[in-house]
Amino acid sequence: MHRLLALAAVAFFSLPVLSQSVSFNPISLPKGGQVIGDFNGDGREDILSYYSSGHFQLQISNADGNYFSEPPVAVPNGGNVSGFAVGDFNRDGNLDLAVLSSAQNSNLFYIYLGNGDGTLRAPVAHALSFAPYSAIAAADVNHDGKMDLVFMNSPSNSAATFVTELGNGSGGFTAGPVSNSTYYNLYNLYTGDFDGDGKADLFSGTCGPGGCNLIVFYGDGAGRFGSPTSASANQSDWTVADVDRDGKSDILTSTMGYINSKDQPYLSVWYGASNRTLVAKQIPTTQCTFGQPAVGDFNGDHIPDIIFPEHNCTTSQTSSAEIAFLAGKGSRTFGSEQTLFNSTYAQQPGGATAVMRGNHDTKPDYLFSQTASTSGGGQAYYLLMNQTSGKFAACTAPNHPTGFHVCSPASGSTVYSPVKFSIGASGQVPMRKVEVWVDGVKKYESLYGFSHYAFLDASIPLSSGTHAIAVFAAGWDNSLQLKQYSITVH
């Protein structure tokens, strides 16, 4: 299979000058969560949530645009859920679920194979080498086309260890490499590619009275992680995303004061770099930020924007707070803000955030939670459906968890040069890009998408004759999908 290469020079579709304003329609949800995926194959992402002690629950999309709750699922062995990971572990085209249990001294994790209709099969237990584990992530770490799992063991009295379980493509796993670190009390585990070398990396963090330490562990392409790079922060609600659309993962946080510090009126970003450094920069905001920010092209200008919670810098429970939009301008700069959702500081809007596909268009939608009222009363969950007019991707992603939707050019078609390529792709992991190769030569790379979806729109000059087309879609772990066909150019 071809190795993904650098961007080739081609003709771009022209983009109109667009207003930076956005428009969203909020809908209420029965539950929320930060783990999403299309478990019923309808082209709308579903939501995985913690239900109660020892249970989890799927919120499944349905035909009328709403969500319904599947019955709660109990985790075996009497433990609570301490982590989820989503992937197609048996390569049947349906999303499956890996669940990590916090049962005392348990070294087990559970695989729930998906049926493709929003339901899950009975769990199958798998044993790890030691316990306990605090986090789990899915990625194809060794590029064999089979989804793997990485577990983090981070007890309070010893340095963290990463244990890789290599998938066999049939829903089973075998013990892989073990990677030791020198960091204590790590929590949360994210995957990405922070140096852009096409190998899956890991990100985690640790926090104390002096603030937080953000650590990236770089992957070797075989399931080992090391050569850490770290940076200091004063916030623990971080997001991994490509903030500047350079094909490398970045780390974005608000500046909510951690323990001994105060909230500040800016966001903090650490840009990934090919030399394995983290380049820090502050993004000014009009008010003090808190909670977890989210990244996507929300206004359709093909430049990453940010949605984030902020408040008026006082800690009064009745003071104002809001979900705000910050328009990207390119070159790591941002423009004006826009309020999307009004709330109060006591309700802490912006919990359990995610960028997701809530309908069949190509516009990113925004999921979040907040306390139901200023006096408490549990959590309220909202999905802000993107109604913005803009130059979003022209071709929708397939209504399936994986695969391609090629709007043009069709297989076997006869076309004129320049050839208009318009493609949507979906994947089992967060998606990074789509590429077009012609006769074995890479012609175009599109680093455009959100969540489990990536898109490409390009006009490519081609000579007359019959051409072999190869379309690649890559996740952030560089797991690949391939579609091949031929076209004839007049």
Image (cartoon, grey):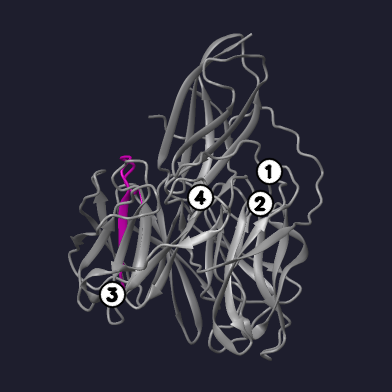
Residue 145 belongs to the span the image colors magenta = yes
Judging by the rendered image, the residue that carries numbered circle 1 is 392
**Along the line of sight, the residue nearer the viewer: 17 or 37:** 37
Residue 153 belongs to the span the image colors magenta = yes
Judging by the rendered image, the residue that carries numbered circle 3 is 102
Which residue is pictured at 31% across the width and 73% down the height?
Answer: 154
Residue 297: image tag: 2
Nearer mark to the viewer, of 4 and 1: 1
Answer few, some or many: residues within 10 Å of disc 1's Cα (few below 14, many 20 plus, some between 14 and 19): many
Contact between marks 1 and 2 (CB within 8 A): the answer is: yes
Magenta region: which residues? Answer: 139-154
Compared to residue 11, the image places residue 128 above or below, namely below
Residue 381 x/y as whole percent:
57, 70
Q: Secondary structure at mark 4?
A: loop
Contact between marks 3 and 2 (CB within 8 A): the answer is: no
Residue 463 x/y as whole percent:
62, 12
Q: Quadrant of residue 314?
A: bottom right
Judged left or right of residue 245, residue 57 is left
Which residue is pictured at 68% across the width and 43% down the height?
Answer: 392
Amino acid beneath label 3: Ser
Q: Quadrant of residue 427?
A: top left
Compared to residue 120, the image places residue 321 above or below, namely below
Residue 166 visible in the current orientation: yes
Q: Secondary structure at mark 2?
A: loop
**Along the line of sight, the residue nearer the viewer: 363 or 313:** 363
**Along the line of sight, the residue nearer the viewer: 435 or 368:** 368
Instruction: Tell me which numbered mark, 3 or 4, is placed earlier along the sequence.
Output: 3
Residue 292 visible in the current orientation: no
